[in-house]
């Protein structure tokens, strides 16, 4: 097959996922890449890399059009220029989407229509993000109009978990030919076996934003300090501000919180940790699956997962002894902390995660994408 892949901001988290998956396809297919910039890490085997800078200064202007009219004038202009650059004989155009920039799907629809080829979308984020993630109702409404229009034109819609796929397809016009497929977000990190930590450190990597609220966790941690006064909560990320911490913890208790400097080398922090913490959005049926937990799985540490009801985390990690799941409330989290410490101190068997880790491997996910694209292009 001849494939045109469209993705933005190569080098950030989501486009790196795209690069990893495309790397699984290049041995069988001729693949061209269309982006707004040169890849920070070139993908071996790519036939042609087309780059067209995106006018970022006009993003504020476009956001107003999205909110008011469900329109994307800047993305449309970029797409018209892009279609003149690329080759003309593709079997399928696949757009990789995250919530940073929706131009990849705008361009994908236009190019696929003009060339008369199949159109596929792979999204790691729900678009638009549901249930409170977007503060302005007008912005959610505008993005919903865009999603309905563009996703309805796709021949294949792939999402990073089954809950997100169900949500995304619910926004599309019904179609008997459109295919939906779950492509788990592949984790690129290696498997690590660290010595057992002598410290009682609960580690959270990443940022707290949107509906990811640490308040319930902090209240439970306050109670934990009464039983384990040596416990520490460490946060490592670009923005480690803990909302409401001063109203929950005393000044003395706040001394048990450490902020690590942002780094891509988290090994020193993982070594110190006894428990790895993941906090999902505080809402029922949230379709997002934290990417950090897929990396946590490969580290021999117990995971404490704060998640809602009917979520991807709740479904995927149910029954694992080394993943302790908690509700969004103080009591559940406090009991979960005690349970996680107990499990961590009992020489747990981390091999129970092996089958799940295989499901998240880039080889496995790449194979599913490859088969899905082949079936799509084989269909009349």
Image: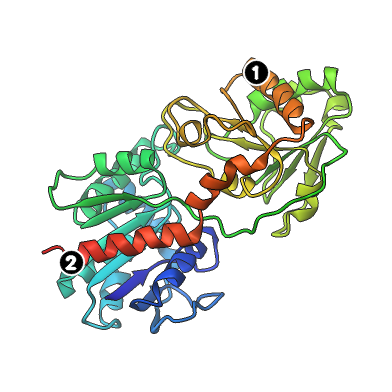
Q: Does any portion of residue 109 appear in the rendered image? A: no
Residue 319 horizontal/vertical position (percent): 54, 29
Q: Nearer the viewer, residue 327 or 198?
A: 198
Residue 323 horizontal/vertical position (percent): 62, 33
Q: How is the image coloured?
A: rainbow
Question: From the image, which quarter does the C terminus lie in?
Answer: bottom left
Q: Which of 62 and 124 is in front in this view?
A: 124
Q: Find disc 2 in the rendering and name its residue.
A: 378
Mark 1 to mark 2: distance in Å? 53 Å
Question: From the image, which quarter does the N terminus lie in?
Answer: bottom left
Q: What element carries label 2?
A: helix
Q: Which residue is drawn at 85% across and 23% down?
A: 228
271 lies above or below 212: below
3 lies above or below 320: below
Which of the two labelled residues, at mark 1 and mark 2, occupies the earlier sequence position? Answer: 1
Mark number, residue 330: 1
């Amino acid at each position: 097959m001849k494939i045109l892949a469209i993705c933005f901001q190569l080098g950030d988290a989501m486009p790196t996922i795209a690069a990893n998956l495309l790397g699984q396809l290049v041995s069988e297919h001729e693949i061209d890449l269309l982006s707004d910039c040169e890849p920070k890490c070139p993908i071996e085997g790519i036939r042609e890399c087309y780059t067209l800078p995106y006018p970022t200064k006009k993003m504020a202007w476009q956001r107003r059009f999205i909110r008011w009219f469900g329109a994307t004038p800047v993305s449309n202009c970029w797409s018209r220029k892009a279609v003149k650059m690329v080759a003309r004989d593709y079997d399928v155009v696949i757009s990789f989407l995250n919530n940073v920039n929706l131009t990849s799907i705008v361009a994908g629809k236009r190019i696929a229509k003009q060339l008369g080829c199949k159109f596929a979308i792979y999204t790691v984020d729900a678009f638009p993000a549901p249930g409170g993630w977007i503060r302005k109702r007008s912005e959610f409404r505008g993005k919903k109009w865009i999603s309905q229009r563009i996703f309805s034109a796709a021949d294949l819609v792939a999402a990073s978990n089954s809950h997100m796929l169900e949500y995304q397809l619910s926004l599309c016009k019904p179609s008997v030919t459109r295919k939906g497929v779950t492509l788990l977000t592949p984790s690129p990190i290696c498997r690590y076996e660290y010595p057992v930590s002598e410290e009682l450190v609960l580690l959270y990597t990443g940022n707290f934003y949107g509906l990811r609220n640490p308040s319930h966790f902090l209240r439970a941690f306050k109670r934990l300090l009464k039983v384990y006064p040596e416990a520490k909560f460490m946060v490592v990320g670009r923005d480690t501000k803990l909302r409401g911490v001063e109203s929950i913890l005393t000044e003395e208790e706040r001394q048990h919180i450490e902020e690590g400097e942002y780094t891509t080398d988290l090994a020193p922090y993982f070594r110190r940790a006894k428990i790895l913490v993941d906090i999902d959005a505080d809402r029922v049926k949230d379709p997002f699956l934290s990417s950090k937990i897929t990396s946590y799985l490969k580290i021999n540490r117990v995971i404490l997962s704060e998640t809602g009801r009917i979520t991807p985390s709740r479904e995927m990690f149910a029954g694992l002894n080394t993943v302790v799941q908690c509700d969004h409330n103080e009591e559940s989290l406090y009991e979960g902390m005690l349970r996680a410490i107990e499990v961590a101190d009992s020489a747990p068997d981390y091999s129970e995660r092996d089958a799940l880790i295989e499901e998240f491997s880039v080889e496995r996910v790449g194979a599913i994408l490859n088969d899905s694209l082949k079936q799509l292009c084989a269909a009349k």
